[in-house]
């Protein structure tokens, strides 16, 4: 009888031990992915061809978004359209088309947001950017997309 009690206690400890270990591993993985920390600073993702813009900001006073686009294609590009989407509202970039030399940058500002795209100063934003361009003297349009985030000024 004595051995059965010890075996039952050991099985109990092992079962809960494994469950706790799994919870700790999942929590560590979520922490490593940044799930538990609020977004800080600016973040860029996507932009497989042109490369991430060198800088960007959401101006809550003018209700516009400005990004300094970069050409990392290896050939001159002609940007024919830039669309910025915030909270489901899309605004187009003004002043297009323009040429960007290899390795050069070009500032692009959106038209003003008026509805869901309005972000108050200090609030976090996430802007989806779609850039339409041609490479060199080509005529076929290509698209590059990505997401830029930060806090509105």
Image (tube, grey):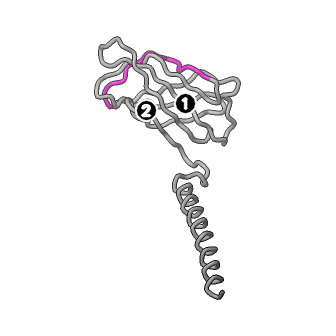
Residue neighbourhood size for the residue with mark 2, other residues' Cα within 10 Å, grouped as few (<14), some (14–19), many (≥20) = many
Camera-nearest residue between 65 and 133: 133
Residue identified by numbered label 2: 47
Which residue is at the far front? Answer: 1
Element under label 2?
A: loop
The percent coordinates of residue 112 (x first, y second) are 63, 23
**Residue at the image position 34 percent from the left and 31 percent from the top:** 72
**Residue at the image position 50 percent from the left and 31 percent from the top:** 67
Residue segment shown in magenta: 90-103
Q: Earlier in the sequence, mark 2 or mark 1?
A: 2
Camera-nearest residue between 104 and 149: 149
The verdict on residue 13 being magenta is: no
User: Quadrant of residue 99 in the image?
Assistant: top left
Residue identified by numbered label 1: 128
Element under label 1?
A: strand
Q: Is residue 1 left or right of residue 67?
A: right
Q: Is residue 47 left or right of residue 83?
A: left
Query: Residue 70 bears which disc, if any?
Result: none
**Residue at the image position 64 percent from the left and 79 percent from the top:** 9
Which residue is at the far bottom? Answer: 2
**Residue at the image position 48 percent from the left and 18 percent from the top:** 81
The percent coordinates of residue 100 (x first, y second) are 36, 23
Residue neighbourhood size for the residue with mark 1, other residues' Cα within 10 Å, grouped as few (<14), some (14–19), many (≥20) = some
The quarter of the picture where the C terminus appears is: top right
The percent coordinates of residue 18 (x first, y second) are 57, 67
Gap in angstroms between the C-alphas marked 2 and 1: 11 Å
User: Quadrant of residue 60 in the image?
Assistant: top right
Q: Is residue 137 left or right of residue 53?
A: left
The quarter of the picture where the N terminus appears is: bottom right
Q: Is residue 28 left or right of residue 141?
A: right
């Amino acid at each position: 009888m004595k051995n059965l009690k010890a075996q039952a206690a050991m099985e109990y400890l092992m079962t809960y031990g494994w469950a706790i270990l799994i919870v700790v591993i999942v929590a560590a993985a979520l922490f490593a992915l940044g799930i538990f920390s609020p977004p800080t600073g600016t973040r860029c993702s996507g932009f497989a061809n042109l490369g991430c813009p060198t800088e960007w900001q959401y101006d809550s006073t003018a209700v516009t978004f400005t990004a300094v686009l970069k050409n990392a294609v290896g050939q001159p590009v002609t940007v024919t359209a830039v669309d910025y989407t915030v909270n489901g509202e899309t605004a187009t970039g003004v002043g297009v088309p323009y040429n960007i030399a290899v390795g050069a940058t070009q500032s692009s500002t959106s038209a003003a947001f008026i509805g869901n795209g309005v972000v108050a100063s200090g609030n976090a934003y996430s802007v989806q950017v779609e850039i339409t361009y041609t490479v060199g003297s080509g005529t076929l349009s290509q698209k590059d997309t990505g997401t830029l985030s930060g806090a509105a000024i």
